[in-house]
Image: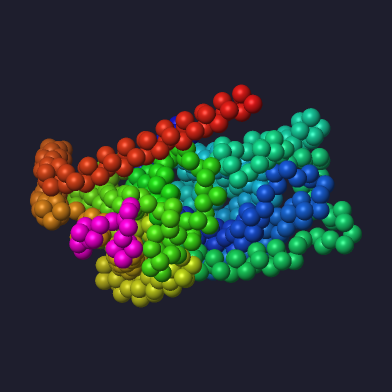
Amino acid sequence: MVLQRGVNFVLNQLLLRHVDPAVFGLASVPLDLLLNTALFLSREGFRLTLGRTTLVGLSSDTCEFRQFVNLSWVPVLLGPLVSLLSLAFLPSNHNEDIGGKGQNADALRQTGLLFCLAASLESLSEPAYLVCQGCLLTTLRSASEGLATLIRSIITFVLLVWVLPPEKALLAFGFAQVGYSVVLILVYWGYLIYVSLKGGGQTGIPGASKEAAMDTTSTSQTTQTPLRLLALSHLLPRAPSSSSALWVEPSHLALAFALTGQSFFKHLLTQGDKIVLSIGSSHYSQGLYALAQNYGSLAARLLFQPLEESGRLMFARLAAGNGGVVGEDGAEAADDKKKKKTETSVATDHRRGRGAEPGESAASQAMLKVLVGALVKTVILVGLVFACFGFNYTRVLLRLLLPGRRWETGAGVGAEGSGEVLSWYCLYVLFLAVNGMTEAFVYAVATQQDVVRLGALAAVSFAVFAGLTFPFIRWHGTVGLVLANCAGMLVRILFSIHFVRAYFDGVVSTRKQDGGEGHVSSTMLSTREKQPDMFPHPVVLASFVAAFAATYASDKTLVSVDEVEPVLKHVVFGGMVFTGVLGSILWTEQDFFEDLKSIRRLATGRREEAGSKAKSGLEGKKGA
């Protein structure tokens, strides 16, 4: 998997060296928006509905399985229809040539049809995908999508560089997306055909994920009696065996459409920037934003997302008074489902000020405060590195990755280049990092009422983004869209920080009233000690500001020269400044590093404890 991602990254870098920014912008913004919207409307509600049903332990000739399969074919029918409707909203009447190659509305319309075909083909894999997910074959999804992404990158590169002429370059992305869909069809349906033919279809669909196998809420029969696929024809729509049963469960069909409608607003939120770019920006500006998003999102995916997922799990367990902290290996994942109700009720009690439950220890809440402060401060420090250093070194990075003048300026389109847009996107990475970690805590401990407030907050955040987008774009071009995203994200960050402070105020003040053994002493309840230490020391913040000013001046003075020596001086100078910032962190944040050591010791201890318990359980079973 790592090798696959590495090859895909290299191919993408080679692709960006050859593709025109306007062509890349069209493929990454309006066409990608068309594809995502078509797939979302045709399948999202059905994935959410059928995802609640497990097929493990069933036989393919049962009424429940046939209704499941029949409903899974509805997206196949909706896919082509929704794709063509989405194509109608593609801004194909744009008079701007794509990269000055004469590729205008005709090229966009032809590629749009290829993307519609790709969406329709991908919907054909949906029945097989849903059956595999119902059988807990989660690893098959990551493998199939990884392979399909690799094939798409190869097809795009080969067609763009060696096969298609420059005036037909946009078609490469359309054919590559069709190839992506075909790979998904072959993998999912090929796997089910293989299982059906193997042993006459009597052996069932094996291979439940390791996560499912570790879940103690599932009985031992669950992993030993997978779905029995008696015939491949059972994966096609057919009437249930019972004459009184309908082809599909009406309540499930209604729920699927209802969930699609409820989730559509979330889709608008996630695709808001692409919608705005498709309406009011040039193809070149779309390419600049897509390039910045591709590079900037690497930090979010590789650094912040794994940390957020682990943090969310640890937040929920400590808030429930469990005290069990686990790492990414999920050594205690077997207890998750058993404790969901407990976690929800305890979090509700905290928000209502009821105080600690008997099983909830003061130590776990103290550790929760340390954990929240340490993780939020970690992402802030990393985000500040991107904002203060990445901002002034993007031009150097792009010169290494994308040599030449293709991405530097938009001749005839605008003066901004990819370096400027990517610089401001580095600032946006800081907002993404802080919002991701603080919202991870909110969702880990939030009550149902809090979730409703979060939905309203998302609407407010989108309103701020939408209200500022067009004025900012008019004043600052593509950079304005990045700034509008920062403003919308700031609304969510402020709410999350307020939630964190209110949560710990409620927890600690309640314990002060309860008193008693095992509770926090009233002498330790100063305002400072109530709240987690989330923000860096003022000296550290000042050092980052000074570092930004120094490297900004160096960037403007040295990198504007097209010689190698000034660029090397700029890089060396940045290394020296970063060393000074790192020294200020080590000098002022000693408590922060002690907190990180405590978290690591606790996590290691809990994993070892869980491992010893599992080992003892296995030895007990063998002895019995």
Q: Residue at the front extreme? A: 516
Relative to 571, residue 373 above or below: below
Write the residue at 63% across / 44% down.
Answer: 218
Q: Is residue 256 left or right of residue 608?
A: right
Write the residue at 45% across / 60% down.
Answer: 346
Q: Can residue 127 be seen in this view?
A: yes
Quarter of the figure with residue 494 = bottom left
Name the foreground residue: 25 vs 571. Answer: 571
Write the residue at 43% across / 58% down.
Answer: 357
Q: Residue at the top extreme? A: 623
Q: Residue at the right extreme? A: 243
Name the foreground residue: 518 vs 542. Answer: 518
Say whether residue 321 is magenta. no
Q: Is residue 119 left or right of residue 352?
A: right
- Residue 377: % across, % down: 25, 52
Write the residue at 78% across / 44% down.
Answer: 59
- What sort of colour scheme is used for the picture? rainbow
Relative to 548, residue 251 above or below: below
- Residue 4: % across, % down: 47, 34
Name the foreground residue: 177 vs 138. Answer: 138
- Residue 483: % across, % down: 29, 65
* Stretch of the chain drawn in magenta: 511-527
Q: Quadrant of the C terminus?
A: top right
- Residue 489: % across, % down: 34, 64
Q: Is residue 422 visible?
A: no
Total tally of numbered discs in the picture: 0
Name the foreground residue: 583 vs 2. Answer: 583
